[in-house]
Image: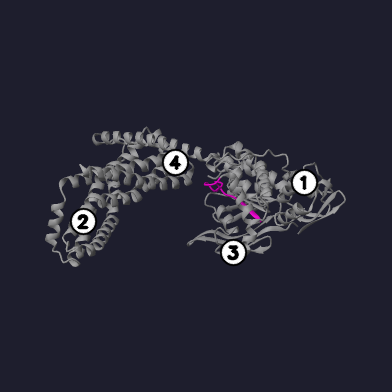
Amino acid sequence: MADYIIDSDCLKISGSLNKDTVADLFAKLQKEINFEKIDYISLLDLDNIDSAGVAMLDELIIMSGKELVLKDMNTQVKDTVSVFESKSLAISEMPAKMGFFELIGDAVLKFISESFQMLVLAVDILYWSIIALWNRKGQRKGSLIQQGVQIGVDALPIVTLLSFIIGFIISLQSASQLKQFGANIFLANLIAISMVRELGPLVTAIIIAGRSGSAIASEIATMKVTEEIDALKMMALNPIRYIVVPKFHAVTVCMPLLVLFSILVGVFGGMLIGIYYLDLSMVSFLNACLQIIDLKDIAISMAKSIVFAWQIVVVGSHYGFQVTGGAEGVGKATTISVVISIFSVIVMDALFSLFYLI
Amino acid sequence: MQKPIIEVRNLVAKYGDRTILEDISLDFYQGEVTVILGSSGGGKTTLLKNIIRLTEPFSGSVKIFGEEVTQMPEDAFTKILKRVGMLFQNGALLNSIDIHENLSIPLEQHTNLPPAIVQRVIRKKLDLVNLSHALYLLPSELSGGMKKRAALARAIALDPEILFFDEPSAGLDPITSAQLDELILDLKKLLNISIVVVTHELASIHRIADRIVFLHKGKLVFHGTLSEAKECKHETVQEFFKVGRFE
């Protein structure tokens, strides 16, 4: 407990002036004291004082606007005051925050610079990927198979499950509407077109972005933070060739296969609804599917899947290589790479939709 | 006779079935720097973590400020924790926030101090570790030595009565390491803090140690002053002070 009394021009503080008592006393003094009449602060009856207490005395002196004199200090109080005295410390200015327009300008500049860097990285990755088709040097042995398993095989169960559920749900929702008009057979057209043209590639790309894109970003970011990338450079190895190219090759092969699988499973999910809810036969459902889908749809779908795959690898690698700031940076790089991958995949999907108009 | 500030009695620590510390009994005294020494894997950090309950002891007793802490309820132990500070091996600053915010955490969470006083305390504590210029920098913008000093400023934010250091010199160059030792001695002198340091840097031990605790393969083989340690007949202790490192 700390308290005070006023004795003519002297403020006498008593009790313990520490982090637990300073808040109350400081509020009381601010409210009740007219510093114009005070010239001294007496600490004769002070039992003990800590850094918060000294900070309060300094704050009082600065608030008073004059040189209040501290007096009657015992050795312990005097020593503590001399250690923690902070009146003479230079006040560091907080870095100025950017205004609204500065923030917009900064964001635009960052976007332009990042897009350029990503483009350069994409060209670099493409170049080394083509070189690596003939010359496997500069890559870890067996890395293509390992990456293929991680990106493709390991993703198969989740792609299967989600594609089946999506095909099943879309069919279920549409079937009741189609049934009202006697247009049961058109369920096959609907599910085939939506799975081949849109949902197959998109769902797979979103899963791969969340699963493999984040893994790529975090792996590279961790390697950057722990100086493994520098170590590779010092061993005269190109980090892009050593780390990214096997992933690029693996995803280029695996993604179209995963998309094909997703389409088949999605259509199968829809077919179950067609057979058991709309009383269609399996043969008529499959016939309708094959009639509505032409080669162009499949070709665009496969092209899409490869472009999406490349986007995911480039975005993941970019944010991995750009990481700063230790473990915290790795988390941020991973999060932003997933967000940007999914965003760019959806934008690219919209652009691909234009091809269907031709 | 000086009163111990930490009393450890018959402490046993285990990781699974593996015994790390066997029947350790020792005292740490007010206003002294006690250095815990020992080979890697000898149980130094485990002893420190058992004292401050970052790891639960298997058996035995630990008293801090005269209170048994091993079985103490969490809220009572929180009160003890507010009176101690810890400098971790890598500083353990929160990376997502700047140094100013790192220091304001204990002050804002555990006191009702008005913002003006909090600012003043933060600035003074950073000044004490010669880091006034780093107030608004992120930990990632600091060097290893600066990070440790900033972490030390955070550890002393609440004027602790006991400070624990886990290998303060690890990863630092000899000059920075010596500066950190100077800082430890200054804090002891200025604030009368009891300091417990885990290290195996011989130069550092000579600079700061009042008392030595020597652990070997989980057992306490020596406990006494630095000069007594140099006269100790135990083979490993002799070897350490002769060679300056563990073979």
Please, which chain is the residue tagged with disc 1 on?
A
For numbered disc 1, what is the local secondary structure?
helix
- Quarter of the image where one finds residue A216: top left
Disc 2 to disc 4: CB gap under 8 Å: no
Please, which chain is the residue tagged with disc 4 on?
A
**Image point (47%, 37%), residue name:** A106
Residue A143 shows in this picture? no
For numbered disc 4, what is the local secondary structure?
loop
Tag shown at residue A323: 4
On the same chain, marks 2 and 3? The answer is: no
Quadrant housing the N terminus of chain B: bottom right
Is residue A326 rendered magenta in the image? Answer: no
Q: Which residue is mark 2?
A: A190
For numbered disc 3, what is the local secondary structure?
helix
Amino acid type, residue under disc 2 in the picture: Leu
Residue A86 shows in this picture? yes
Q: Which residue is mark 1?
A: A79
Amino acid type, residue under disc 3 in the picture: Glu
For numbered disc 2, what is the local secondary structure?
helix
| Residue A276 percent coordinates (x, y) | 19, 67
| Residue A116 in the figure: left or right of residue B229 | left
**Image point (17%, 58%), residue name:** A186
Disc 4 to disc 3: CB gap under 8 Å: no
